[in-house]
Amino acid sequence: MSDLSQIIQFIRKEFNHSLKSFHLPESPKYLYDPIRYALKSKGKRYRPIIVHLAGRSFKSDPDELMKISLGIELLHNFTLIHDDIMDFDDTRRNMPTLHKKYDISSAILAGDCVFTISQLILISMEHHSIKLLKKYNEMVLEICEGQAFDKEFESQEKVELDDYINMVKKKTGALLGACLCLPAIMQNESSEKIEKLYNVGKALGVAFQLQDDIFEIFGDQKVIGKSLGSDIIADKKTVIALIANNINSIKWRKLVNEFDGTSLEKIRRFLIKNNIINEVEELTSTYFSVAYKSLLNLGFNQNSEIYRFIKIIQGRHS
Amino acid sequence: MSDLSQIIQFIRKEFNHSLKSFHLPESPKYLYDPIRYALKSKGKRYRPIIVHLAGRSFKSDPDELMKISLGIELLHNFTLIHDDIMDFDDTRRNMPTLHKKYDISSAILAGDCVFTISQLILISMEHHSIKLLKKYNEMVLEICEGQAFDKEFESQEKVELDDYINMVKKKTGALLGACLCLPAIMQNESSEKIEKLYNVGKALGVAFQLQDDIFEIFGDQKVIGKSLGSDIIADKKTVIALIANNINSIKWRKLVNEFDGTSLEKIRRFLIKNNIINEVEELTSTYFSVAYKSLLNLGFNQNSEIYRFIKIIQGRHS
């Protein structure tokens, strides 16, 4: 495994270096200062790592893979900037969100510009760039639709689990799907393979999101590095909240309303006693299994870098 | 001239038909209902007309020209949706702006989606689409920069005329530049010709904007179809306000502060007496002349459709 760890560390370092050396003009400061602020925040770089590991399996040109990974990470940043405004989120990775640090107008414009730069990076690719751009922009449409469903659900009393999962596939999964399938498009792989890889990403998106939802309530505060229970305070619809609400709406509402942001014990007990947390963990495993099976069918064996990286993510604690 | 009028009417009709028959999914309503609302508003369609007239001079395929014009008009809609949020504008073409009719989150997301659809339309073009997409996205960056300078100027006491004109070239002119040069890129014209056409659009952007600024104060309310003086009420920095402020800041501030939205007489008298309106009209003529001269140098004679269409715009009263 140590070999893979070294490769991942190398990718992360090279990616951070590429992003850092990406030239942004000094002026107008109103536009580029907020963008510099947004790009300072580093994140785990899961998406660029997946792009490079997927591309390595096709023996793709690393410089071209770097363009895909930059394009995808910038697109990810764009969606975070705009989603934080839409979702009224004040902090991200322990820093004020862009519209809190500056204002809503700056954040809208910065997001638009980051999205445009992302397109220009993909446009600069040497092979199959029209096919790449088509899939990339279709994927962005799916992300927009996912965000729209998420906003619709906010005002709905009851949301069906299937509808919710479908939303996560679009909002979170589509981008991971692009991480896996854009390198395949670059290598001119078959449409069938490209679509299958895209769907692996969608399954992973659901699995990652479910993991995050569990960490938010059952994680170790020291490891997570942020205050737990913020989804409960914001009364966000997560799969956990959705199942809890479907099982015992009155009790769940009471627990959410009583939660003061300090002890999660009562909520944890309720979720364990009613088998909810088990159910969500099983659902998580199911979606990881879907991803593994598809990868095996596509010819990636258990020793392949991408397979092993997903295993690492499945075993994470934050 | 009647021949050209017929052509323009035909283009407008065909364009409206194409836009109307463009399929938008029913669901999620949170996303597509606001987009349908935004696209209902018709506008003058100057941009699609310019695309088609420029393309006709190159004998371009009308179906491909239609794609460029749809891409550009959708991009224009995207910038209006986001700019209206950033500029706190409540009405556009006598209708509530999107974020007033719905909310800011819906409007941000609708704008992002319209921008993405615009990209997908250009991606579907058959020839030179990578070159087209490159210029198109570089142009969007210029629009973002223009909007950023405009926002910066809001909080500056004094703005130099040159800086202001440069902002208008980016914010308004770049898109008109694309209307002229994207059809040339489609026909694989030389880089030099493409850049020159782009700059014709920038000059036109300044000329059109100056005309609009003048109509806002000296126009006929019945012809303009909206209440005059809204720029004064919002204390917007226009070239008129900028020159007035540079000539006699105290008197101009007094006039702006005293204006109650009814009679523009005092303001008009001040602008005439101090030769300001003359200066702005001369500036407008200068920028139209730059456009005409460049067009002649590029081989478009005075009888060419695009030349004559610009003459029509120069002679407009609203």
Image (cartoon, coloured by chain):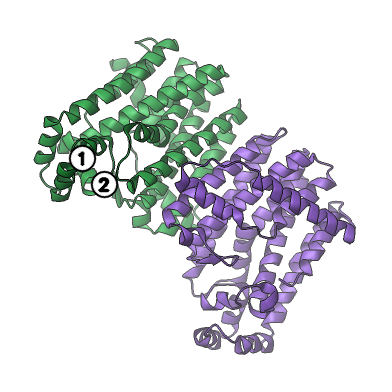
Chain colours: A purple, B green
Task: Give the left or right position of residue B208, taking residue A217 as reference.
Answer: left
Q: Position of residue A259 (x, y in %)?
A: 53, 85
Quadrant placement of the N terminus of chain B: top left
Q: Residues within 10 Å of mark 1 (few under 14, many from 20)?
A: few
For residue A309, above or below residue B50? below
Task: Give the left or right position of residue A158, taking residue A13 as reference.
Answer: left
**Residue A37, image quadrant:** bottom right
Residue at 66 percent of width and 78 percent of height: A221
**Residue B14, image quadrant:** top left
Secondary structure under tag 2 reads: loop
Residue B21 in sight from this viewpoint: no
Q: Type of residue at label 2?
A: Asn
Nearest to N terminus: mark 2 or mark 1 = 2
| Nearer to me, A116 or B4 | A116
Q: Chain of mark 1?
A: B
Residue A312 in sight from this viewpoint: yes
Question: Label 1 near label 2: C-beta < 8 Å?
Answer: yes
3D distance between C-alphas at marks 2 and 1: 8 Å
For residue A2, above or below residue B169? below
Q: Chain of mark 2?
A: B
Residue B167 has which mark? none
**Residue A232, image quadrant:** bottom right
Residue B225 has which mark? 1
Q: Would you name the residue on which mark 2 appears?
A: B94
Q: Residues within 10 Å of mark 2 (few under 14, many from 20)?
A: few
Q: Position of residue A27 (x, y in %)?
A: 48, 41
Residue at 27 percent of width and 21 percent of height: B285
Task: Give the left or right position of residue A253, taking residue B287 as reference.
Answer: right
